[in-house]
Image (cartoon, rainbow, N blue to C red):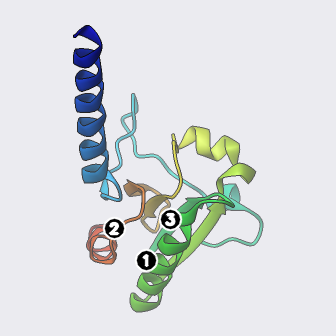
Amino acid sequence: MTGLLVCVAVLALASAFGLIRSRRDGRLRAAVARGRDEAVRVSAAELGEGVTLGERATLLQFSTAFCQPCRATRRVLSEVAELVEGVAHLEIDAEQHLDLVRRLEILRTPTVLVLDTAGRVVKRASGQPRKADVIAALGQAI
């Protein structure tokens, strides 16, 4: 009887975790800097040589080589960058920029950061965001 109760409890906890994660996956939320008063900034120099931020905003995507949702996220962000003038889409390999990944507290890929013109992180999403949510987030960054 105890084994059955443990099994039911584990299944209930796993189901609750799955529901919470699916509700939060891809949601763009305000970027909160833990223990800091000022906003987190990302400079073009940190991203690589020859990289420039967008005139009005930048969609910064952290990806890895074997990340399946990263491909769909790349497609969505590229479409939004083409739609909105002055917005750039940059895709960064998380494995090549580990110092930046640690500083920005990137825990999984894809992670999308919406940067304003000064490089401040305005919004962030872990997982694949929806196109409408990205456009709405850009409205706040611009």
Density class for disc 1 (Cα within 10 Å; few <14, some 14-19, many ≥20) is some
Answer above or below: position of 89 versus 6. below
Which amino acid type is shown beneath numbered disc 1?
Answer: Arg
Tell me residue 88's x, y (percent). Answer: 52, 78
Three-letter amino acid code of the residue under disc 2:
Ala
Q: Report the side of 86 relative to 90 (left or right).
A: left
Disc 2 is placed on an element classified as helix
- In this view, the residue farthest toward the top is 2
Of labels 3 and 2, the one closer to you: 3
Tell me whether circle 2 and circle 1 mark residues in contact (CB < 8 Å). yes
Q: Is residue 86 visible?
A: no
Q: Which quadrant does the C terminus fall into?
A: bottom left
Tell me what residue is drawn at x 31 percent, y 45 percent.
21
Q: Which residue is mark 2?
A: 141
Which of the two residues, 87 or 132, is positioned nearer the viewer here? 132
Q: What distance separates the C-alpha of mark 2 from that of mark 1? A: 8 Å
- Residue at left offset 75%, top offset 72%: 50
What's the residue type where badge 3 is placed?
A: Pro
Tell me which residue sits at (39%, 87%) in the image: 84
Q: What residue is pinned by disc 1?
A: 56
